[in-house]
Amino acid sequence: MVTTALGPSRVWATLGYGIVNEVYWPSAGRPQIRDLGFIVASRSEWHEVKRVARYQLSLPEPYIPLPRIVHEGEGYRLELEVSPDPLRDAIVVAFRLTGEDMTLYALLAPHLDGSGWHNNARADRDLLAWKDCNALHLTSDCGFSRTSAGYVGYSDGWQDFSRHGEMRWTYGEALDGNAALMGELTSAEGVLALAFADSPEGARTLGRSSLRHGFETVRRSFAAQWEAWAKDLIIPEAPEEIRREAYLSAMVLKVHEGRTYPGAVVASLSVPWGDATDNPGGYHLVWTRDAVEAGLALSSRMASPLPLANARTMEEHVARAVAKPKFFSSLVGAFGLLAVALALVGIYAMMAWSVSERRQEFAIRLALGAGSSVIARMVVLRALTLAAIGIAVGLGAARALTSLVASLLYGVRPDDPASFVWTALVVAAVALLACSVPVRRALRTDPLSLLR
């Protein structure tokens, strides 16, 4: 399940296998830890509660995401209650362990900014991890008697217990790697605070502030906000089990809402880390179907449902979205056709004027025996020379001004070579077409009439 506060806090916590899994901060797309789990150990045996996986999860109300988890194993009972702090970027975890000669250990696997690479961890009085502008801090009101920072798969806390059956390692730091932290809690009952900030000092301050505020105060504030939200829900008359499922469904939708863009819903706050991947997509990837179903569900859950204004089909929404770019594209296309027409007229006018100015020259050449092909070649070369100059100047100017039309293009780059080549060929073809009439006029020139 997923839980988050409705206040200014920007933390989302997911739960699975009876422990805290990914925790997201400061947005629903940035996981900061892989999990926060626990080991229960005596002098002769130890158990990682996630692997034992014998637990029960309950909520105070189906519309309040305040999970209480009870683990029961051989000789122990571990009770956990998880609550995000509505006022701070932190979550608090109340714990209570019962069992003869049992000690509780917290295991924290940072994956700051969605990746286990290049994390830094430090184990001292508290547990601290940081990378770039992401930092977390895990502290407890009862404190840690021993702590250790290691590398996953080599010197982490789970490896320590797997090899020795107890905690022996107390490494102070694990830098620039896939780090993991472990702390031995001094008491069987207390509160943990996991806080996030853009600096280690900020995370430490938030964590200790949450502890000082107290778990019960945080819990009451959290529950009150969700109670107030639930008053606006419309749940039709139905059997109690159906009503419970309806409240639960509305709560699931609400916890998946983003903070950056209100109303935005993430498909699922879960990342399938696997063994060797830090893929940030995972189940976050949202299909259109998911967005439509979530939108209909959100519109139907409010107590005072707003009328749907300007309802349109998807085709109409798409048409409205592309109307302005389509208009500008059509406008640019119209100006382009106008430019081609002006080029045709201009080249024709230049060729006609050039031919009329050289009529006597053509008459003399024809009288001296020059063939019509010679005259035609002279006119065509003249036209192509002018066209080549225009193409060179035009391509240079177009290349310099492509940034102005980049936003109007779709499916083609502003500096697309094929577009420039085809444009040059079209202009050359226009030049040949424009000089066809002057060529015919030159070939029909009567040498004798001009010489007289």
Image (cartoon, grey):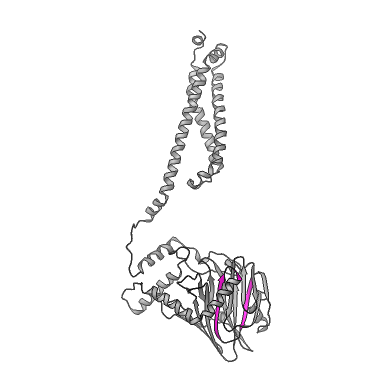
Residue 294, image quadrant: bottom left
Query: As drawn, is 303 to the left or to the right of 225?
Result: left
Q: Nearer the viewer, residue 87 or 437?
A: 87
Name the spot of residue 355 as percent of width and height, x first.
51, 19
User: Would you say the magenta stretch is mainly helix, strand or loop?
Assistant: strand
Name the spot of residue 248 as percent of width and height, x first.
41, 75
Q: State whether residue 399 is above or below residue 5.
A: above
Q: Is residue 188 magenta?
A: yes
Residue 312, image quadrant: bottom left
Residue 331, image quadrant: top left
Name the spot of residue 259 as percent of width and height, x first.
47, 66
Residue furthest toward the top? 452
Name the spot of residue 328 as percent of width and height, x first.
44, 44
Name the residue at 43% across, 70% down: 254
Q: Is residue 111 visible?
A: no
Label total for image: 0
Q: State whether residue 245 is above or below residue 277.
A: below
Magenta stretch bounds: 178-200
Q: Nearer the viewer, residue 410 or 390?
A: 390
Residue furthest toward the left? 237
Name the residue at 56% across, 88% down: 74
Q: Is residue 428 visible?
A: yes
Q: Nearer the viewer, residue 306 or 313?
A: 306
Q: State whether residue 227 is above or below residue 431.
A: below
Q: Is residue 227 magenta?
A: no
Q: State whether residue 171 is above or below residue 443.
A: below
